[in-house]
Image (cartoon, helix red, strand yellow):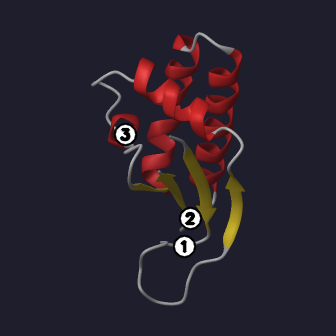
């Protein structure tokens, strides 16, 4: 099981022309899934929505709020692969929050 992360310049499921892919992260999929499963708390409103078997989308406002949750998640990670995966997620959340109209998509297995 793993999670891939894609940063798009627009909504990925809008049905119109596909948005441009700005960044794709595939190198931390299993570690990210493990970190989310082991260390996400119910109070982590946005990160708890990530489905390891389906697709989850965050707009720029969700990404900004999820960044704080990911910072707390990073502190709870117990292995270096999990920490690297969450750092990658945090970077992409920050990029999404900084780009107006962008969306972050997390694709589970």
Q: Secondary structure at mark 2?
A: loop
Q: Neighbour class for label 1 at 10 Å: few (<14), some, many (≥20)?
A: many
Q: Which residue is mark 1?
A: 10
Q: Does 35 sit left or right of 22 as displayed?
A: left
Q: Position of residue 25 (x, y in %)?
A: 69, 50
CA–CA distance in space, label 3 to label 2: 17 Å
Q: Secondary structure at mark 1?
A: loop
Residue extending furthest toward the bottom:
16
Residues marked 3 and 2 touching at CB (< 8 Å): no
Residue extending furthest toward the left:
42
Which mark, residue 102? 2
What residue sits 46% from the left and 89% below the top?
16
N-term mark: 2 or 1? 1
Q: Position of residue 52 (x, y in %)?
A: 42, 43
CA–CA distance in space, label 2 to label 1: 5 Å
What residue sits 50% from the left and 40% below the top?
1
Looking at this view, is 70 or 34 the one in front?
34
Q: Position of residue 75 (x, y in %)?
A: 57, 13
What residue sits 51% from the left and 25% below the top?
35
Figure disc tally: 3
Q: Position of residue 101 (x, y in %)?
A: 53, 68
CA–CA distance in space, label 3 to label 1: 19 Å
Q: Which residue is mark 3?
A: 46
């Amino acid at each position: 099981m793993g999670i891939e992360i894609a940063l798009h310049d627009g909504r990925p499921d809008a049905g119109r022309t596909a948005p441009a892919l700005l960044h794709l992260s595939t190198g931390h999929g299993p570690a990210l899934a493990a970190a989310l499963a082991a260390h996400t708390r119910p109070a982590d409103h946005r990160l708890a929505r990530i489905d390891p078997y389906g697709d989850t989308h965050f707009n720029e406002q969700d990404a900004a709020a999820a960044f704080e949750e990911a910072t707390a998640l990073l502190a709870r990670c117990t292995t270096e692969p999990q920490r690297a995966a969450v750092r990658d997620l945090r970077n992409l959340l920050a990029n999404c929050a900084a780009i107006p109209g962008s969306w972050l998509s997390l694709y589970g297995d």
